[in-house]
Amino acid sequence: MTTVEIRASGRIVQLKRADKELFPADGRTGAVTKADLAAHYRRVGRRILPQLRGRPLMLERYPDGIDGPRLVQKDTPCHFPDWIHRSELPKAGGTVDYPVCDDLATLLYLVGQACVTPHRWLSRADRPDHPDLLVIDLDPSGEDFEPVREAAVLTHRLLGELGLPADLMTTGSRGLHVLVRLDRRAAFDEVRAFAHDAAALLARRHPDLLTTEARKAARRGRLYLDVQRNGYGQTAVTPYAVRPLPGAPVATPLLRAELDDPALTPRRWTLATMAERLEAPDPWRDAARRVRSLGPARRRLDRLRAQEG
């Protein structure tokens, strides 16, 4: 097996077994090796690192490729280099020493550990109880993506009514994520309650299309507005992360106008096509300007709920 040395962030990262196939050829694309995965994360580095810095991570690893066992890793093993940042955070009955990816060298080292997909917390390690992201996961009941596009438009519109600019992204799997950037004043309980109430209002407005029922049997074919990720220790897929699915789809930020494209699917962009996508302007380049406090939105939401109750 080949070992490749990569210079990044002022360090030399050794990518062992660089020719190891992580994604088999599937008739549409060729096999994807660990070196190919590292090349992707290096290519998207400028866009993915701002989404990762300062956040505890959950690593989704496939040492034997995506057809092999899935390993979910939250702790930072002692064999990880000392220069990889860590954050020791409480859990029930103890603590977890989470890895934190603050630079490209760390990201490439994680690829070397066969981490296909890094999943990030919605809060940062310095204030783990106070999220700076709210996520609504649009989870369809079937394979038809049209309800997802429609739900995303409706969710984006409601958040606009509430004074909350929203970001959009494909998950690379089945649905879309709608994200709101927060100023970290509100704790997780308040953020989750707000997300739940906003989702309930949407489902009440569009009962034939949307539901907040967690039980699949109760959804009756409707799209599930999932807000359960908005809690301490929960994670969401990182933008520009590769998903462990055939074709190596990539979770990709969107412009609002792209929701109107009937060709849009959750797996529209892949490891093989991401270079072309990166030639376009970053849909999230003005993200810092979209940070909001939840208080005014909460008051607007309560007024709407009372009016439409």
Image (cartoon, rainbow, N blue to C red):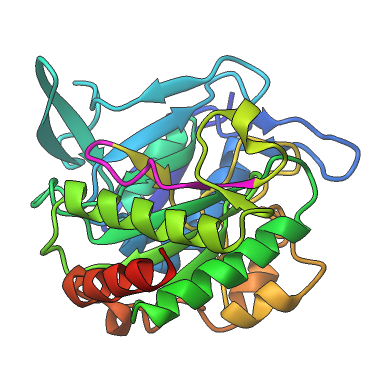
Identify the residue at the far right of this view: 27
State the residue in front, 145 or 38.
145
Q: Is residue 1 left or right of residue 127?
A: right
Q: Is residue 119 magenta?
A: no
State the residue in front, 179 or 87.
179
Residue drawn 56% across the image and 14% down it: 69
Can residue 175 be seen from the camera position used here? yes
| Residue 7 position in % (x across, y down) | 38, 54
State the image quarter where residue 219 is shown.
Answer: top right
Q: Is residue 231 magenta?
A: yes
Give the magenta part as a residue range: 223-233
State the image quarter where residue 304 is shown.
Answer: bottom left
Residue drawn 24% across the image and 29% down it: 80
State the residue in front, 215 or 172.
215
Q: Is residue 8 left or right of residue 38?
A: left
Residue drawn 62% across the image and 24% down it: 65
In terms of secondary structure, what is the magenta stretch mainly?
Answer: loop
- Which quadrant would the N terminus be assigned to in this image? top right
- Which quadrant would the C terminus be assigned to in this image? bottom left
State the image quarter where residue 194 is shown.
Answer: bottom left
